[in-house]
Image: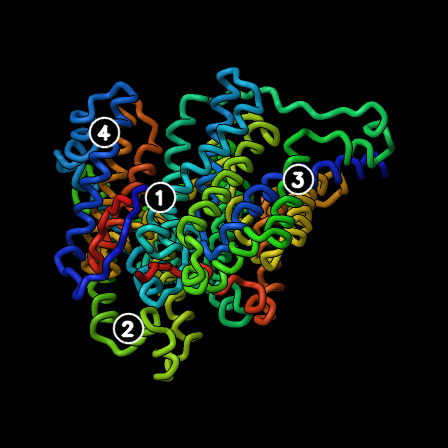
Amino acid sequence: MIRIQLEPRAEPVRFMRLGAPILALVLTVIVSAPFLLALGLNPISTLRIFFIEPLSSPNGISEWLLKASPLILIALGLTVGFRASVWNIGAEGMYTIGAICAAWLALHFGSAGHVWLLPAMMLFGALGGMAWAAIPAFLKTKANTNEILVSLMLNYVAALILSYLVNGPMQDPDGQNYPQTASFDPTAMFSPLFDGMRLNGSIFITIAAVAATWLFLERSFIGYKLTVSGAAPTAAGYAGFRQSRLIWLSLMVSGASAGLAGMMEAAGPLGQLTPVISPGYGFAAIIVAFVGRLSPIGVVFGGLLLSLLYLGGEAVQMSLNVPASLARSFQGMLLFFLLAADVLILHRVRIVRR
Amino acid sequence: MEHLLVPLLNGTLVAATPLIYAAMGELVAERSGVLNLGVEGMMLIGAVTAFGLSFAGYPAFVAAVAAAGAGAAASLFFAILALSLATNQYAAGLALTILGSGLSGFIGHRFGSNSVPPIARIHLAFLSDLPVIGPVLFAQDPMVYFAWLIAAAVSWFLFRTKAGLVVRIIGEAPGTALAIGYPVLRIRYLTTMFGGAMAGLGGAYLSLAYTPLWVEEMTAGRGWIALALVVFAAWRPGRLVLGAWLFGGVSVLQLFAQGFGVRLPSEALSSLPYLATIVVLVAISRNPRTLRLNAPLSLAQPFVPER
């Protein structure tokens, strides 16, 4: 009988906090090798196409940052909630509603060429995400309802609302009945930063959000309260931190960031709404937040890594005809190994034979 | 009326079946203090395993058993993290759901849009011919009946056997159970694997009987609805079956609504099961005492045995 035994360390190992994500990535790559062999693929060249090739051209770098941007933005919001132990897994729905609200504005005022259109769309996107996040927040604080299940159910509802809208009220009248909205006017879109590449100005929103979240979490009293109430709810209660306020705050911040991310995607690479507007960013952002150690700076690296996983998935799909779900398997494995590696921060793991 | 009633009741029992499997397994795991949010992922792995084997020509029975095995194996990923390594159970369950969704899509990719012959329904000479109750109660496929058997067995096991009592004690007070001498982690491994096996069967029911084909993400949130059902049932098997029938009814109702002349967009009807989940969660959670009295005390709390 083999048994895994945990022995608490006297002090947490600091370098493992940063080393765990790297260890997890290495383990993910090692474990994926037999899978690739089973498919008749050369693991080394496949992994090269997966991880190296996407970044070997200026356009690849542009795509890398373009995909990392919404992941980082959503994960920043989730980080705030996860620190307070508010388990919002409904970012996908908030992203969708944010995109819808922004698109509504774009389709109504797009041709008039107002300067305020893009800022107004940003506002609408964030407000849309917040409104969607208000549902689990309200139910959690007023009826004690589990926010995990409610926010997740709302993902499906949001996807159905989007499907209804692009097949009905918001459908492009000149679109030959395709389930999509009309294309946005250029004034309702972020302009590309470089010619011929899709990376656009919305990346500066994400950069600003990283700084703002850092200030909020590391330098503000409310941010401190959030962290305390997540780590030690009872102590936070004695200190007089109101739990319901922190729940509202967590969900509003993550709703705003996910809604804004949806707006950035709609007014950026998409330029219209279609029935599917996210390749699972809402879920991937959960992994980003964990890989980023629930810290705003770490989330940047987490977002860049997960973005690379998406690009790599697309690359092997195109050149080797490997299904894109390989990337999602990698995401799952990465989170799995990360959680396992995290144990090493506080514990020594012994494998005992009895 | 009968021409509507029979398919309605029939459809309700069929739609409830995958929920009964998945939720009954999770109920046992939660009774022992383990909250596994990976139900959706394990169902998907079960669904793709069952479909693959059925597609390769194996009989449905073999496919279903293998799906249960695959679900149990998948639950080990969660168990190693959440039990042996005592990580956060929420995160470990999410990892399993993401992994299950990715792996099942990856494996199922080659099945394209093929379908398999659905599991045959049982026909009993006399009983199946009774009006209304005949086709509803006595002409289902074997997996529907097996789900009822599982529900009865879980109820008997948890409340009428000593082993079931031990499971419940571990869910309430793992420290005490360990002090008395029960191997807490080993028993939690078993309940978690039972949960995985049942989720696998629930997934198998979807790809073998409910819609006998493979579609990526074909569980469409049923794993999460199963998790909600366990809360709704206040961790009691009998109430869980009633809850599953309620949800089965809601999801079938959408198919009949158009027949009744309801003029709503199809998306509004499709969102009914998800909205109903939220409504029942609110209804059950509003009274905190119900939850506090029934929820296993150690639910979702990592347990490291002291030596």
- Quarter of the image that includes the C terminus of chain A: top left
Nearest the viewer among B201 and A352 is A352
Quarter of the image holding residue B302? bottom left
Please report the residue visible at 45 percent of the width from the left and 38 percent of the height from the top: B72
The answer as to whether the residues below labels 1 and 2 share one chain is: yes
Q: Is residue A196 above or below residue A283?
A: above
Q: Nearer the viewer, mark 2 or mark 3?
A: 3
Q: Is residue A108 visible?
A: no
Q: Nearer the viewer, mark 1 or mark 3?
A: 3
Q: Nearer the viewer, mark 2 or mark 4?
A: 4
Q: Residues within 10 Å of mark 1 (few under 14, many from 20)?
A: many
Label 4 secondary element: helix
Residue marked by disc 4? A33
State how far apart marks 1 and 4 are (Cα): 38 Å
State how far apart marks 2 and 3 are (Cα): 51 Å
Who comes first in sequence, dot 1 or dot 4? 4
On residue A223, the disc is: 2
Left or right placement of residue B283 versus residue A134 in this view: right
Label 1 secondary element: loop
- Quarter of the image that includes the N terminus of chain A: top left
